[in-house]
Image: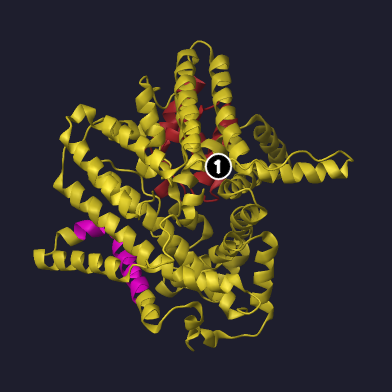
Chain colours: A red, B yellow
Amino acid sequence: MNKEEIFTKLNSIFRDIFDDDTIVLSEGTTATDIEGWDSLTHISLIAAIEDEFGIRFDMKDVLKMKNVGEIADRIAALAG
Amino acid sequence: MTLTSFSFFVFFASSVLCYYLLPLKFRWITLLVFSAVFFALSSSPFTGLYPIICILVTHFCSIKIHQNSPMNPGRARRYLTCGIIIILGMLAVLKYNGFFLLHWNVLAARIGLKGTGHELNWLLPLGISYYSLLAIGQMTDVYRGMTEPETNLFKTALFIAFYPQLTAGPITRYGEMREELFTGHPFSWTNFTHGLQRMLWGLFKKLVLSTRLALIVDGVYGDVEVYNGFYIWIAAGLFMLQLYTDFSGYMDIILGASEVYGIKLPENFRTPFFSRSVQEFWQRWHITLGAFMRDYVFYPLERSRFMTHMRRFFTKAFGRKTAGKLTTNLALLCLWLLIGLWHGGAYKYIFGWGLWFWLCLVLGQAGEPCWKKLRVFFKVRTDSFSWHLFQSLRTFLLVSIGNIFFRTGSLKAAFRAIRLGLTTAVNPWVLFDGSYTRFGLSEKEAVLIAVGLLVLLLVSVLQRSGSVREKIDRQGIVFRWALYFLLIFAVIVFGKYGPDYDPADFIYRGF
């Protein structure tokens, strides 16, 4: 799976979770750029990503991934 | 020995002298020795056994977890589980045995069995609620691969028992603290003076403000039948301020003392009264406890197999977004009940600092569409100062209601106080008719509280735009020293000592 496909799917998940159709993700998008991305929604977001891509992040990933670029990199590594 | 006693300052000065007289690489040993002395002087010798067990378990399990992690994750997990059970087992037996026995006896009576046992009146070891969390955090971080285990037993001992944070936190992470604690820090005039300034500010909050606020709060909650109506709500607000000045003052002394050694501990408070929601309040109040609960309880619970199945089930029924909210709120309920229980084995904590805040969060979130309509209807300008002020006052009120449970003797007493606050005469004039004198406060002391709280507000406003101490550093020498002398003078002259002075009486030290 290439980065572009990952970003397309991520964009759709983010829009769904944060109820905002204007979200356009980039590598550097962080929690401060998206209203409502806090520690509570972070975990729902992670679960939705895992379900969508059929992967499982370990806890280190969950705690350390700080922007969308890092999330996409881990997805690429885990999804192969 | 507590951090506001004279003996502590003698102890602290000796430790600083020894610390800086020794070569850099031995400085952590000074801290370890002084931490052991501090523990010995602050609690009964028998209770020293528990931190020793905690240190040995943490050290041994961390190494075993690391050795087994790559090749045998199942065994690593068993070591982690075993370590956590021992640490939590000690905490449960020492802190919560009365709470558990009470329920067991009630249950036993219901099913026709003979209730067993009496409450174990063993001494609760100093700081056990804090160092237990440090130990669990260290083992879990090693298991998660977020940090290497410590190979030197004495360094593990220092991390668990570093004396400034031993009694009330902050709850630190091993990965963040290893450099801070074990790399000896060269003497820095800035660290030294900033540390002392912070300790002084903490003493001001505790001795000048908190102890005086306590007089009114204790007076009202001591007899709510007499002091009812508006008294109850004033006392609830003042207890919020008392708790803040007490706990954050304690933190200032702890963080300031550590800074004198060159050690930076994480902040536990970030101007909480500017919070515009209960959720934001908990991101600014007792920050390290909230972060610990998030990373070691909430996230693992949310990612557990049970929750994953629940989320999938809810997703099919209600869609992804609602499913996420439902499981998050379920995990949050467990988290808040645990936070309540951490504060003490009593329903007043479980309800007042657990269920109440969970309800505030869930109702705030669930009612958001409704609140949004109301904001539109009343044409609220959400970026205006008045709206922010309203939100902060609303948060203060909600948290103060939770604090009524914290302060009163029991759940029943808290509901009684709230009932008396709502159903008796409306008497707001007690704010202005000198009623405070009934609680042993003179007019001058009331003025002192008012001025002190204004200074606190000013400092909080300044803190929002950066470090106040750095701002003071940029001022001229006359202004700076005038300020320091004023603060020293205030602590010495206005500090509440006298015959009733009890240096052990920090609220959060009891945990």
Q: In the visual, does B196 lie left or right of B380?
A: left
Residue A60: percent from left, percent from top: 46, 29
Q: For mark 1, name the chain.
A: B
Res B437 seen here:
yes
Task: Return the residue nearer the eye: B14 or B475.
Answer: B14
Query: Magenta stretch: residue B466 in it?
Result: yes
Q: In the rendered structure, which amino acid carries the disc numbered 1?
A: Leu
Residue at the (69%, 79%) spot, across then down: B423
Quadrant of residue B401 within the rendered picture = bottom right
User: Going by the picture, which residue comes out furthest to the right?
Assistant: B112
Residue at the (50%, 10%) spot, across then down: B71
Magenta residues span B451-471
Quadrant of residue B480 within the rendered picture = bottom left
Across the whole image, how many numbered discs are drawn on residues? 1
SS class, disc 1:
loop
User: Which residue is disc 1 drawn over?
Assistant: B123
Residue B28: percent from left, percent from top: 27, 31
Residue B103: percent from left, percent from top: 75, 45
Task: Return the residue nearer the eye: B320 or B486.
Answer: B486
Task: Return the residue nearer the eye: B166 or B495.
Answer: B495
